[in-house]
Amino acid sequence: MQYLPSAQQLPPEKDPATIIEAINVCKEYATGTLNVQALRGINLLIARGEVVAIMGPSGCGKTTLLNCLSSLDAVTSGTIRIVGHDIRSLSDRELTDFRAREMGFVFQTYNLLPVLNGLENVELPLLISGVVAKEARARAWESIAQVGLTRWARHRPAEMSGGQRQRFAIARALATAPSIVWADEPTGHWIARPARRSST
Ligand SMILES: Nc1ncnc2c1ncn2[C@@H]1O[C@H](COP(=O)(O)OP(=O)(O)OP(=O)(O)O)[C@@H](O)[C@H]1O
């Protein structure tokens, strides 16, 4: 990723490796009489195949940036291009199709549907993107196996631990083999194994 302090520093030629571009992005929340400026002039380029972590203290704007970059939230000003498309130029329908085809999401609060079990939750985006039922089921099982939760596939989210919900959310994001995976604190529930105590 290139973090560019100002829009003027953006390279003049379009690099075909670039998958995400943010140009002078600002996001303001209006809350009653108070305006919160969550993003102020963000410029960055992310290349295909890159793994990028956005780090910073609580409240600094990480989730806001992720939501704007991934087109879930609208920017107040500035431009975001994903795979060369200015996301403002797409209709709601085009944007929905584009997200379903190209993106997987792991939300901070997982957003698993409570009435569906783990398997059905993972299967759902595949069915929505038009994969036939039999193939969707096979791919959902594959994705669940990758996160090591085959035994829990028939359980509903309410019967899972936080870490299991998080892993089902990851399996769901990966099941469609998207070009881009957006993940908000995707390992927050993965607790490192404690170091073994010395017996002496
Ligand atoms: N819907 C909203 N309405 C008003 N203000 C908001 C809204 N969402 C976020 N904010 C404000 O925008 C700023 C950035 O919030 P954001 O959630 O992006 O931070 P964050 O870095 O992801 O925080 P955390 O690490 O605690 O999840 C904060 O000051 C927050 O209070």
Image (tube, rainbow, N blue to C red):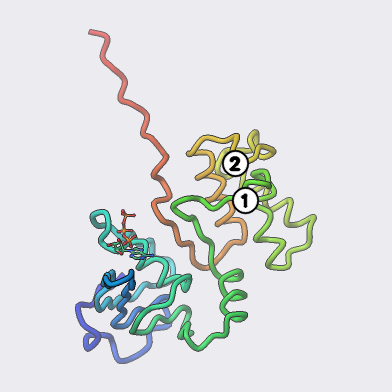
- Determine the residue located farthest toward the top in the rendered image: 200
The quarter holding residue 62 reads bottom left
- Amino acid carrying label 2: it is Pro
Coordinates of residue 93 in the picture (x, y in percent):
62, 80
Residue at (28% x, 87% y) in the render: 11
Q: Which mark is residue 16?
A: none
Q: Residue at x 28, y 82 (%)?
A: 24
Which part of the image, by quadrant, shows the N terminus? bottom left
> Within 10 angstroms of label 2, few (less than 14), some, or many (20 or more) residues?
many
Disc 2 to disc 1, how far (Cα)?
8 Å
Residue placed at 52% from the left, 68% from the top?
Answer: 179
View extreme (bottom): residue: 12
Q: Mark 2 points at which residue?
A: 157
Q: Can you tell which quarter of the image residue 21 is in?
A: bottom left
> Toward which corner of the image does residue 94 lie, by quadrant?
bottom right
Does residue 55 lie above or below 76 as drawn?
above
Is residue 137 rendered to the left or right of residue 32? right
Q: Which of 29 and 123 is in front in this view?
A: 29
Q: Is residue 20 left or right of residue 38?
A: right
**Label 2 or label 1, whichever comes before in sequence order:** 1
Q: In this view, does 134 lie to the left or right of 87?
A: right
Q: Are marks 2 and 1 in contact (CB under 8 Å)?
A: yes
Most foreground residue, 169 or 181: 169
The picture places residue 164, in percent across and down from the top left corner, at 53, 39
**Few, some or many residues within 10 Å of mark 1 (<14, 14–19, 20+):** some
Q: Position of residue 114 (x, y in %)?
A: 62, 46
Q: What residue type is labelled 1?
A: Leu
Q: Is mark 1 on a helix, strand or loop?
A: loop
Q: Position of residue 195 (x, y in %)?
A: 30, 25
Q: Which mark is residue 113?
A: 1
